[in-house]
Image: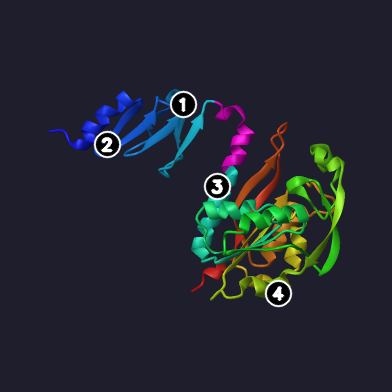
Amino acid sequence: MQTLYRRLLRLMPRLGVRVTDLAPGTALLSRRGRYTVKPAGNDAWLVLKGPSKAWTSVPLGESGAQLLLGEKSAADERKLQMAASEYLCMQHVTAMFRLYGVNCVLDVGANHGQYAKRLRRHGYRGRIVSFEPTAEAFARLSKAAENDPEWHVHHLGLGREESTAEIHVGWNTMNSLLPASDYGRDRYKRFHTTRTEEILVRRLDDVLDEALDGIDDPRPFLKMDTQGYDLEVYAGGGERIADFVGLQSEVAVLRLYEGSPPMGESVATYEAGGFEITGMYPVTREAATGRVVEFDCVMMRPKALAG
């Protein structure tokens, strides 16, 4: 005898609703056949908009994960790799947060809040303290954080010394306290024109107590994306750098800014502070040569796991 559920499903096509039976008690309903279903392994289905033949499910080794590729995915290898790298970096970072018990992220060079939003999408619910010195970007950052009580924002930059400074603006996500290098100007048209804005700069060790206020047993993580200025931010941490269980820094293989440190110098400085690499993820690559321009370098302090 048919159940009421099954009898109702049989009526759906008469109403212009397509029914795809997936399993006992489970069905996909779609208007006018706009969605199709493709098996993706045991007890799993891919719900696709468009013809299913346009998509390929690729197993990721023995992890059990599947990568869904469209017909055009492989046409731009660099774009696909960059998107995958960003996702895998954030997945790795949040996994390290769980392993090391991170409960506060200092997001230095926050821009519009992109990094913090990614952390939230990947499940991190602890405190985020974002620092953004430029007025336009800070206005957007404040808007992004306004409904998140655990996301605090500060209108300032961090560096080696407390001061005021001139930052190059109008470069979108690439505003920097450093001038563009010859290589940078050749690569990005946005560097051909610039204006400057006066900003306030403070030391990391001067803002850390406020950032951690109210957190029992703070386990902070330092994320830096300051367009060539990360080592200056790090230097401003002084002895308080030892309080951090991990960090993420954008390190340059091909330098976009005059005076920015090469990757080897940056990594060696962080290693001298007790941090060790857990992941390296390309941020940008040259389309013509395939060379990596910058990496996101994730490092943790293994001794922080003790106890």
Left or right for 119, reference 189 = left
Q: Earlier in the sequence, mark 3 or mark 2?
A: 2
The type of residue carrying mark 4 is: Glu
- Disc sitting over residue 23 in the figure: 2
**Magenta-drawn segment:** 72-84
Dot 2 alpha-carbon crowd within 10 angstroms: few under 14, some 14 to 19, many 20 or more: few
Are circles 1 and 4 on residues that touch, CB within 8 Å? Answer: no
- Disc sitting over residue 262 in the figure: none
Above-or-below relation of 283 to 23: below
Residue denoted by label 4:
239
The type of residue carrying mark 1 is: Gly
Q: Is mark 4 on a helix, strand or loop?
A: helix
Give residue 76's position: percent from left, percent from top: 62, 30
* Closer-to-camera residue (268/244): 244
Between the C-alphas of marks 1 and 4, the distance is 56 Å
Q: Which of marks 3 and 4 is nearer the N terminus?
A: 3
Is residue 82 covered in magenta?
yes
Left or right for 304, reference 258 = left
Q: Which residue is drawn at 65% across and 51% down?
A: 296
Q: What element carries label 1?
A: loop
The type of residue carrying mark 3 is: Leu
Between the C-alphas of marks 2 and 1, the distance is 22 Å
Residue denoted by label 1:
50
Q: Which residue is drawn at 81% across and 46% down?
A: 170
Which image quarter: residue 163?
Answer: bottom right
Q: Earlier in the sequence, mark 1 or mark 4?
A: 1
* Residue extending farthest front: 15
Q: Which of marks 2 and 1 is nearer the N terminus?
A: 2
